[in-house]
Image (cartoon, helix red, strand yellow):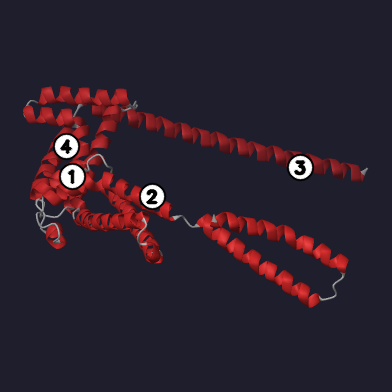
């Protein structure tokens, strides 16, 4: 109702100002001061109406504020309740945040790593969690402002609901801050966990067969050859053995760095990662010692040499072409000079 009155006032003032101006001209009242006063008052009223209209248009209603808070709360609950439940269940004294963060067991770290395994890289997960925390803080602040502003309407159900959801947001915020600090403190563990999981999945067949037949070189050569050909069917490469060797070399370097940056407190994780590292080294050794790998090296070197020779020949042809162009231009200029001289002499 208030909004309708504001709109009606603005429309009335907008149309009444020109009418008053024309009437004033016809009647010739002769009082410029009175006219200025009336017009000034109308302008002030119009400005106030516009201000109220802007407040109405751009400030959310109490219902909207409550709905935003509900939506943000339930979204955060859906995203993080399971992983926080793992953290909470593994720590009876969940209120002691320092004890949770700095005295965590590897068993709990492993369970949390499994829980967030499909939620993307750890740093991206922490970034999304920080965005959620900022949103919840904003919702809580807006709820508090509306509750404090509407203190005369405490009996209305909407403000009771605002208090309920402000309390819920405060509760989930305390837990999510602990979760954020926990993930930050143990970030290197989760980075190593994620990398190890990806590499186990990528080299699963090779690693499994290497564990079963560690000393059967002919059998392992055939297994790795089949794996390379399988990679070749998924994405074609002109030199599949070289591509595979380069890929596993990069993965070995990444795993080495992740192990090196990981704290010595994570003994189980480091031991598992070191075992995987040793297996990848063995697999790479089988690949680079294979006949196919060396054949591809020779073929690649020969192809690169031919490409360099062709490039040199093309450069020579380009240089010869430019030289001929300069010579032709020089000859044309000389002929023109001779023609001009002959005409001048005649």
Q: Which residue is drawn at 20% across and 30% down?
A: 287
Mark 2 or mark 3, which is nearer to you? 2
Along the horizontal axis of the image, is 148 left or right of 217?
right
Kindly identify which residue carries mark 4. Answer: 280
How many residues crowd around disc 4 within 10 Å: few (fewer than 14), some, or many (20 or more)? many
Alpha carbons under labels 4 and 3: distance apart:
70 Å
Do the residues bearing badges 2 and 1 touch, measured as CB atoms within 8 Å? no
Alpha carbons under labels 2 and 3: distance apart:
85 Å
- Location of residue 302 by image quarter: top left
Along the horizontal axis of the image, is 342 left or right of 329?
right
Q: How far across and down, in percent of the image, does residue 149 sit?
A: 41, 65
Alpha carbons under labels 1 and 3: distance apart:
79 Å
How many residues crowd around disc 2 within 10 Å: few (fewer than 14), some, or many (20 or more)? some
Kindly identify which residue carries mark 3. Answer: 333
- Counting residues from the start of the chain, the first of labels 4 and 3 encountered is 4
Along the horizontal axis of the image, is 120 left or right of 275?
right
Kindly identify which residue carries mark 2. Answer: 67
């Amino acid at each position: 109702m208030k909004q309708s009155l504001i709109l009606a006032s603005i429309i009335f003032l907008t149309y009444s100002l020109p009418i008053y101006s024309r009437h004033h001209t016809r009647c010739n009242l002769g009082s410029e001061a009175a006219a200025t006063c009336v017009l000034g008052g109308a302008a002030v009223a119009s400005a106030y109406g516009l201000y109220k209209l802007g407040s109405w248009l751009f400030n959310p209603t109490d219902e909207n504020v409550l709905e935003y808070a509900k939506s943000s709360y339930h979204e955060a609950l859906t995203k993080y309740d399971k992983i926080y439940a793992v953290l909470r269940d593994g720590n009876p004294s969940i209120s002691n945040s320092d004890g949770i963060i700095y005295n965590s067991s590897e068993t709990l770290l492993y369970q949390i790593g499994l829980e967030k395994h499909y939620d993307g890289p750890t740093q991206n997960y922490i970034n999304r969690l920080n965005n959620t925390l900022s949103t919840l803080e904003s919702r809580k602040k807006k709820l508090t402002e509306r509750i404090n502003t509407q203190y005369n309407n405490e009996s209305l159900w909407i403000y009771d609901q605002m208090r309920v959801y402000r309390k819920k947001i405060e509760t989930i915020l305390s837990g999510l801050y602990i979760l954020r600090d926990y993930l930050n403190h143990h970030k290197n563990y989760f980075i190593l966990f994620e990398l190890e999981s990806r590499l186990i999945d990528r080299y699963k067949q090779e690693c499994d067969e290497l564990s079963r037949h560690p000393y059967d070189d002919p059998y392992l050569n055939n297994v790795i050859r089949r794996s390379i050909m399988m990679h070749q069917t998924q994405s074609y490469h002109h030199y599949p053995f070289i591509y595979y060797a380069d890929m596993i070399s990069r993965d070995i370097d990444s795993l080495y760095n992740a192990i090196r940056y990981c704290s010595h407190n994570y003994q189980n994780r480091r031991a598992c990662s070191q075992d995987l590292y040793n297996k990848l080294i063995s697999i790479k050794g089988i690949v680079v010692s294979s006949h196919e790998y060396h054949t591809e090296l020779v073929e690649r070197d020969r192809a690169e040499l031919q490409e360099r020779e062709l490039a040199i020949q093309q450069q020579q042809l380009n240089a010869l072409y430019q030289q001929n162009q300069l010579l032709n231009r020089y000859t044309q200029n000389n002929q023109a000079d001779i023609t001009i001289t002959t005409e001048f002499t005649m």
